[in-house]
């Protein structure tokens, strides 16, 4: 029987292997940052660290973008992995529920599952979409998707449905308004809210500078 530390080590190795072909915005280093943030928030909020670590580490293995939009394949692989390391059924179900309900897409309808562990991991994942790292990830992903950096004639869509969000074609700058700048007010935990405020402010400063330079101003 593996202890929790050994299970985490095996999970790290599994995720590193599973995300070898992932883009720079969703690769192992994104997972690493979310994992570290989640541990920090969990300590502050008094949550179940083991469940949080597993969920943070595995969350992007379930990303439908890795499987041509299929939302079931990744979840099935996570369940198979967790079963292989002798984790209890209860812990497996908690981790799966956290991962299923983690995505920004889930903000388009009422949450069906709630737990402090979900809130911690969700905050950690969203925090990695803010600040300096969030800006870098946005442009990395936008480049991969063939998005324009900015086009003043293309306005952000602030009234998207879940289906429109998944299929949207926009600019990277619009992505700030359609998602990234909304995250500050969607934080669940006190710790997440404090960190988000600072990172949000940095992004606003960046955008002000971006627009100034876009117009060729000093």
Image (cartoon, rainbow, N blue to C red):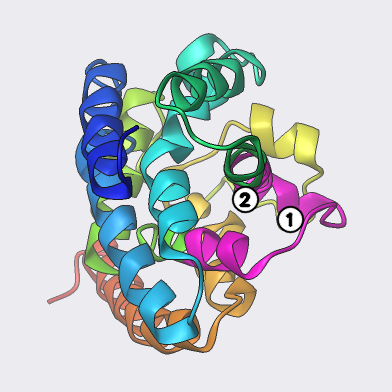
Query: Looking at the image, how many numbered discs can be counted on the residues?
Result: 2
Residue 13, picture quadrant = top left
Give the numbered dot on residue 2: none
Mark 1 residue crowding within 10 angstroms, few (<14) / some (14–19) / many (20+): few
Mark 2, Cα crowd under 10 Å, few <14 / some 14-19 / many 20+, is some
* Residue topped by disc 2: 104
Please report the residue visible at 31 percent of the width from the left and 18 percent of the height from the top. Answer: 18
Q: Position of residue 150 (x, y in %)?
A: 40, 47
Q: Is residue 115 magenta?
A: yes
Depth check: give the residue in front, 146 or 2.
Answer: 2
- Vertical comparison of 144 with 100: above or below: above
In front here: 146 or 23? 23
The one of 158 and 72 positioned closer to us in this rendering: 72
Who is closer to the viewer here, 69 or 12? Answer: 12
Percent position of residue 192, x then y = 46, 79
- The reply to whether residue 47 is in sight is yes
Which residues are the magenta region? 97-123
Q: Quadrant of the N terminus?
A: top left
Residues marked 1 and 2 touching at CB (< 8 Å): yes
Classify residue 54 as left or right of residue 162: left
Residue 160 inside the magenta-drawn segment: no
Rendering coords of residue 76 (x, y %): 60, 16
Disc 1, SS: helix
Residue 107: quadrant of the picture? bottom right
> Mark 1 — residue?
107
User: Which residue lies at the image location 40% right of the left edge and 66% below the top edge?
Assistant: 127
Please give the name of the residue rendered at 38% of the width and 53% of the height, measured from the top-left corner: 53
| 175 horizontally vs 85: left or right | right
Majority secondary structure of the magenta segment? Answer: helix
Q: Quadrant of the C terminus?
A: bottom left
The residue located at (25%, 55%) in the rendering is 33
Residue 211 visible in rendering: no
């Amino acid at each position: 029987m593996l202890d929790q530390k050994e299970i985490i080590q095996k999970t790290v190795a599994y995720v590193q292997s599973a995300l070898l072909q992932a883009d720079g915005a969703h690769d192992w280093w994104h997972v690493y940052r979310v994992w570290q943030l989640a541990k920090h928030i969990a300590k502050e909020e008094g949550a179940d660290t083991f469940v949080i670590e597993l969920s943070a580490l595995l969350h992007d293995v379930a990303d439908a973008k890795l499987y041509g939009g299929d939302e079931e394949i990744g979840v099935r692989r996570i369940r198979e992995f967790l079963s292989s390391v002798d984790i209890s059924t209860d812990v497996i179900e908690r981790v799966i529920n956290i991962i299923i309900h983690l995505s920004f897409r889930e903000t388009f309808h009422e949450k069906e599952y709630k737990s402090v562990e979900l809130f911690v991991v969700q905050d950690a994942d969203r925090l990695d979409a803010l600040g300096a790292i969030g800006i870098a990830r946005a442009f990395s992903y936008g480049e991969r998707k063939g998005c324009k950096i900015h086009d003043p004639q293309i306005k952000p869509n602030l009234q998207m449905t879940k289906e429109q969000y998944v299929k949207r074609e926009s600019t990277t700058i619009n992505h700030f308004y359609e998602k990234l700048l909304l995250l500050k007010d969607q934080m669940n935990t006190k710790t997440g809210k404090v960190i988000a405020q600072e990172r949000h402010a940095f992004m606003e400063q960046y955008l002000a500078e971006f627009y100034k330079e876009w117009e060729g101003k000093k």
